[in-house]
Amino acid sequence: MLIVDDDPMVRSMLTTILDSAGDVTVVAEAEDGDQVVDRVHRHALDVVLMDIRMRRTGGLAATREVLGLPDPPKVLVLTTFDLDEYVYSALRAGASGFLLKEESPQDIINAVRVVAAGEAMLSPPLTTRLITSYVTTGASPRRERARDKLADLSERERQVITEVARGKSNAEIGAELLLSEATVKTHLTRSFTKLDVTSRVQATIFAYEAGLVTP
């Protein structure tokens, strides 16, 4: 994985924490967003742990650039601000979740594992609070567009997206809807294509905007 932060002490601390996990390896670091794409090209990466506020190129611009690459790594946003509009923008751009710098070492390790496995980091209450805060602020135009897209989804696809927005894993969704995990994945793939989204977080934002779930 790659750690992106303009504070060398933070990078060192995070590297120490993550390397101690045993199943997580930090293979590269970057001190600014403008170095990220180069590091992604140089290394086979599963996850980028991305700081948002940096001195030059910020994490939002870097996230958009990374996720615009073919077969990009997952991006986990790292911030000291739990209600930062830039974090929300990064989630809309396709980041797989966000993490506060004050989280415990084990929570940081678990978050990286969750994102690397293809799930969204949606379980902490702060994430839901951030999403609902910005979804419900000036939401009318976005809500109208989202509701228009609902017509493209089948009833089962709506159900699956709703459960994703509630933070459930594929296994939990399958148990709830009496579907196999493979069938859940199929519904998700079709839904993502119809909604033009690339991550569970983007699908969650859509679900809030469309009114499938409410704050």
Image: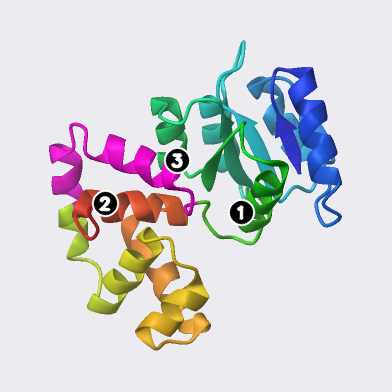
**In this rendering, would 18 be left or right of 154?**
right
Question: Does residue 119 lie above or below 53 as drawn?
Answer: below
Quarter-of-image position of residue 196: bottom left
Q: In this view of the protein, can residue 69 be seen by the observer?
A: no
Residue found at x 35% / y 72%: 160
Q: Can you identify the residue that label 3 sits on?
A: 91
- Say which element carries label 3: helix
Mark 2 to mark 1 CA distance (whole Å)? 21 Å
- Callout 1, which amino acid? Val
Question: Does residue 148 lie above or below 180 as drawn?
Answer: above
**Where's residue 76, x and y in %?**
59, 42
Mark 2 to mark 3 CA distance (whole Å)? 13 Å
Q: Which residues are magenta?
A: 122-146
- Callout 3, which amino acid? Leu
Q: Earlier in the sequence, mark 2 or mark 1?
A: 1
Q: Can you identify the residue that label 1 sits on?
A: 115
Q: Can you identify the residue that label 2 sits on?
A: 208
